[in-house]
């Protein structure tokens, strides 16, 4: 076909190489060029072939396949084109692959900023107790959301166009003069460009905040030891030790309302000078009476989300979310299997107009994949947060796989460290989080589109089915694993929540002087102490019971593991590890 017969307004890149026509069926040149089906009812061989059903050119050059045969009224059979695989992959999948790679990098960057933002605020004049208990939605969260939306739309940014040439150009020597070429969707590309502009602004703002993160402080908020290292202020120790053992996160937020905290130098009860978390005096507090619209909006969103949690116990709320997530996975698996079972009649599964709106279907399925990937990100962070408490539950746990285990921002970075520390559940969730990225690409290639290869469709369908099956099995294992966790009244995923578990413990005193060391030096010093740690409940002299993470003294290890109480504990007024026989303190209450 001559260059004058092409439509240059639809072409994003140059025309690809001519297709291999050795496997084309013996149709007339006009039929092969236009895609008009023959009247022979014999099914076409199940190979990558030209379209053999009646077709009309839809919007944007896409081919609309009829839902029924004009002769019998039955669903029309669809046969497949035969192009080089590279020509189909470049237009249909390359943009989404690049977009998800961009998302992996930006997601890890934003997660780092989100994790350390409370520490930045602690060193920048103070942070309110509400933000320390439940961090607000900020610029980084908005950046993650915008980046996810961008990768959803980039799935429909380009497509393989096979309906741009004139049928009269066909000849006996060149029966198919329409090699596929990559064509762009202007409205989709406009959205992607807008997203990139917004991303540039959010990244510039986030980087300016990132450089405010303290360099001298080893208060890693992702580890138990990192939070314990900055504890020790007498007032904070007394306040956080006085909270009841069963106080929930919402009750903790109400108890600390109106307070502010900062990082500074103070004197401990033992007379030592220490750098750590301390209260902000009334005259030092910032005037936060005039809150911006963003703060008011995000607070309302978080408040509504908290009210939507039906149960007081966070484990039951997690179970509810997992059940809803499982229903979505099952529904997508059923749709995928149905698509594979009706490979030559896709209008049985998708809408009859799905071919004409192939771009919209691809964006929809990419959106579903992003939803699944985001939920695995939530499960990934959860398993990292709770993994240290499983070995701590049994007592005599070494610091490396427990109190020194830090949370990673990306499953790719976390997989090997989690395996090394034998946290198999968290490592398996990290692996599933990695393959969730491939699910987005596979799901986006599932709806039928003109120019799509049969082998491409089969690969996307089979890959989607396998990954969804793995996810369903993994989700069940996560639900079982979560039931094995010790009783945690507050999910220890914020600094304030971890402070309630370590306040008033001997571990805090052991870590005096470690708060300003580099992270590796601090971890090495803690390991060299040779102590073991445990998570359990302890009866206080006042009669209350607290759930704490603390070292287990040599004299109490045997009694803690056997569930008996020593005379030393009785003489200490009930202070010490105590787990009665026959009572399961790991119960989910």
Image (cartoon, rainbow, N blue to C red):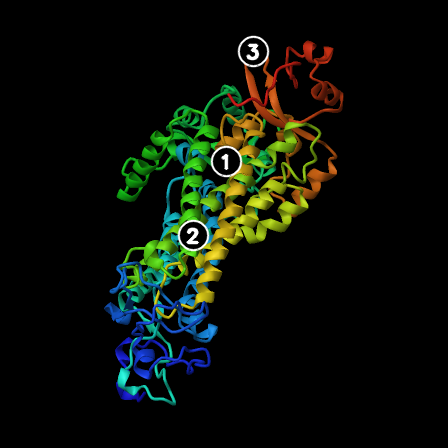
Residue 72 position in % (x across, y down): 27, 61
Spatial separation of the CA atoms under disc 1 and disc 2:
42 Å
Residue 393 position in % (x across, y down): 63, 28
Q: Residue at x 45, y 63 (%)?
A: 97
Q: Is the C-beta separation of discs 1 and 2 under 8 Å?
A: no
Asked if residue 532 is positioned above or below residue 186 in the image, the reply reads above
Asked if residue 200 is positioned above or below residue 407 in the image, the reply reads below
**Res 336 label:** 2
Spatial separation of the CA atoms under disc 3 and disc 1:
26 Å
Residue 396 lies left or right of residue 176; in this view the side is right
Quarter of the image for the N terminus: give it: bottom left
**Res 543 label:** 3
- Mark sitting earlier along the chain (3/1): 1
- Mark sitting earlier along the chain (2/3): 2
Q: Secondary structure at mark 1?
A: helix
Residue 53, by quadrant, is bottom left
Residue 584 lies left or right of residue 159; in this view the side is right
Spatial separation of the CA atoms under disc 2 and disc 3:
58 Å
Residue 56 lies left or right of residue 269; in this view the side is left
Q: Secondary structure at mark 3?
A: loop
Can residue 101 be seen from the camera position used here? no
User: Which circle, 2 or 3, is nearer the viewer?
Assistant: 2
Badge 1 crowding class, 10 Å Cα cut-off, few under 14, some 14 to 19, many 20 or more, is many
Residue 264 position in % (x across, y down): 51, 37
């Amino acid at each position: 076909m001559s260059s004058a017969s092409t439509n240059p307004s639809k072409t994003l890149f140059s025309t690809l190489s001519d297709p291999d026509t050795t496997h084309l069926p013996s149709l007339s040149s006009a039929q092969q060029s236009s895609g008009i089906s023959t009247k022979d009812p014999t099914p076409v061989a199940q190979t990558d072939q030209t379209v053999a059903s009646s077709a009309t050119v839809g919007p944007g050059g896409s081919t609309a396949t009829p839902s029924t045969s004009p002769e019998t009224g039955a669903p029309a059979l669809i046969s497949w084109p035969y192009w080089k695989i590279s020509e189909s992959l470049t237009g249909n999948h390359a943009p989404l692959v690049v977009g998800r790679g961009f998302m992996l990098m930006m997601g890890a960057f934003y997660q780092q900023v989100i994790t350390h933002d409370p520490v930045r605020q602690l060193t920048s004049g103070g942070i309110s107790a509400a933000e320390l208990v439940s961090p607000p939605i900020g610029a980084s969260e908005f950046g993650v959301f915008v980046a996810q939306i961008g990768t959803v739309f980039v799935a429909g940014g380009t497509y393989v166009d096979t309906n741009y040439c004139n049928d009269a150009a066909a000849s006996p020597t060149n029966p198919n003069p329409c090699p596929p070429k990559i064509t762009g969707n202007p409205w989709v590309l406009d959205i992607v460009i807008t997203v990139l502009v917004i991303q540039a602004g959010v990244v510039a703002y986030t980087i300016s905040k990132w450089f405010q993160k303290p360099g001298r402080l080893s208060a890693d908020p992702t580890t138990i030891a990192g939070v314990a290292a900055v504890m020790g202020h007498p007032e904070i120790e007394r306040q956080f030790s006085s909270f009841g053992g069963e106080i929930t996160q919402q009750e903790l937020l109400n108890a600390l309302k109106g307070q502010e905290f900062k990082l500074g130098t103070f004197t401990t009860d033992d007379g030592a000078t220490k750098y750590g978390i301390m209260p902000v005096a009334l005259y030092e507090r910032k005037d936060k009476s005039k809150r911006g619209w963003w703060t008011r909006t995000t607070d309302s969103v978080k408040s509504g989300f908290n009210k939507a949690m039906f149960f007081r116990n966070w484990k039951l709320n997690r179970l509810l979310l997992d059940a809803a997530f499982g229903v979505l996975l099952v529904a997508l698996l059923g749709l995928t299997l149905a698509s594979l079972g009706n490979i030559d009649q896709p209008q049985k599964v998708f809408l009859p107009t799905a071919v004409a709106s192939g771009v919209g279907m691809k964006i929809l399925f990419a959106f579903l994949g992003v939803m699944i990937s985001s939920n695995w990100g939530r499960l990934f962070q959860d398993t990292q947060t709770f993994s240290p408490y499983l070995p701590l539950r049994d007592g005599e746990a070494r610091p490396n796989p427990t109190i020194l285990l830090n949370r990673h921002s990306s499953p790719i970075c976390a997989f090997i460290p989690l395996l090394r520390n034998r946290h198999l559940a968290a490592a398996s969730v990290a692996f599933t989080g990695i393959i969730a990225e491939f699910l987005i690409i596979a799901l986006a290639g599932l709806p039928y589109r003109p120019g799509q290869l049969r082998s491409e469709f089969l690969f996307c369908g089979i890959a989607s089915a396998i990954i969804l099956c793995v996810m369903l099995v993994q989700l069940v294992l996560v639900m079982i694993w979560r039931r094995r966790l010790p009783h945690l009244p507050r999910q220890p995923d914020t600094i304030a929540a971890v402070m309630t578990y370590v306040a008033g413990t001997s571990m805090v005193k052991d870590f005096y002087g470690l708060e300003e060391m580099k992270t590796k030096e601090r971890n090495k010093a803690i390991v060299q102490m040779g102590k073991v740690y445990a998570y359990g409940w302890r009866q206080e002299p006042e009669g209350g019971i607290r759930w704490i993470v603390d070292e287990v003294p040599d004299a109490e290890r045997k009694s803690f593991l056997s569930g008996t109480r020593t005379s030393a504990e009785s003489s200490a007024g009930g202070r010490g590890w105590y787990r009665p026989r026959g009572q399961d303190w790991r119960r989910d209450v």
